[in-house]
Each structure stands twice: as structure tokens, then as C-alpha cells.
């Protein structure tokens, strides 16, 4: 099962925010880190469905991401997590 790397940020006066370096604009949040991770998996499936599945970017490996200077900067105050991606395409009718 593929995974997308997610960055989880938390300010003292906010919820846990989740973003995906490989999927700009795909974000999620939750009041707890567990809730944020559940929502992150759900938003991945929703984004893939919304984008049509075929145009959905493939996830980079953690080694590929670590070679990206922007990713390294973004991880300074973040928790890095792997979110499983489960996309089920609907059969054409």
C-alpha cells in the first residue's frame, strides 16, 4: 500500500494541521494528533477522487523528500508521518 509523507504542525493555540509535500493544497486538521491522522487519510482519498485518480501525483520516497531543501525547511518544527493511501476507483457504469 502506498503512503504519502505528511507534515504535522501544531501551534499552542490551534489544532494539529496536516499538509502533504507532494500534494500542494491538500490539507487537513484535527483536535488531537490521532484525529488529524484519520482526517489526513480521508482527505487523501477525497483529493484522489476529486482529481480523477489518473492525474494524482505519485508519492516521493522519504529519501527523495529529504533531498528537497524546501521539505527540509518545512520539517524543522513538524512531525513527519506516513499516511496510508487507499484509493478505490469506482467502476464505470
Image: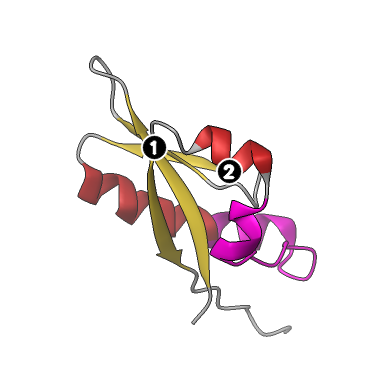
Q: Which residues are magenta?
A: 45-67
**Magenta-drawn stretch contains 54:** yes
**Magenta-drawn stretch contains 68:** no
Q: Quadrant of the C terminus?
A: bottom right
The reply to whether residue 24 is in sight is: yes
Numbered disc 1: secondary structure: loop
How far apart marks 1 and 2 lie (CA) works out to 16 Å
Residue at (28%, 20%) from the top-left corner? 14
Tell me the residue that label 2 is attached to: 26
Q: Position of residue 17 (x, y in %)?
A: 39, 34
Residue 8 higher or lower than 64, as above or below: above
Question: Is residue 15 toward the left or the right of residue 67 in the image?
Answer: left
Residue at (23%, 17%) from the top-left corner? 12
The reply to whether residue 25 is in sight is: no
Tell me the residue that label 1 is attached to: 78
User: Residue 65 versus residue 55: which sits nearer the camera?
Assistant: 65
Numbered disc 2: secondary structure: loop
* Label 1 packing within 10 angstroms: few (<14), some (14-19), many (20+): some
Residue at (65%, 52%) from the top-left corner? 22
User: Residue 75 versus residue 43: which sits nearer the camera?
Assistant: 75
Q: Position of residue 83 (x, y in %)?
A: 42, 62
Amino acid at each position: 500500500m502506498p503512503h504519502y509523507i505528511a507534515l504535522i504542525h501544531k501551534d499552542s493555540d490551534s489544532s494539529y494541521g496536516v499538509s502533504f509535500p507532494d500534494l500542494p493544497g491538500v490539507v487537513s486538521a484535527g483536535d488531537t494528533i490521532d484525529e488529524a491522522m484519520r482526517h489526513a487519510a480521508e482527505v487523501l482519498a477525497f483529493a484522489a477522487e476529486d482529481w480523477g485518480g489518473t492525474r494524482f501525483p505519485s508519492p516521493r520516497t522519504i529519501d527523495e523528500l529529504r533531498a528537497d531543501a524546501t521539505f527540509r525547511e518545512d520539517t524543522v518544527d513538524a512531525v513527519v508521518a506516513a499516511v496510508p493511501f487507499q484509493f478505490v476507483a469506482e467502476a464505470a457504469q
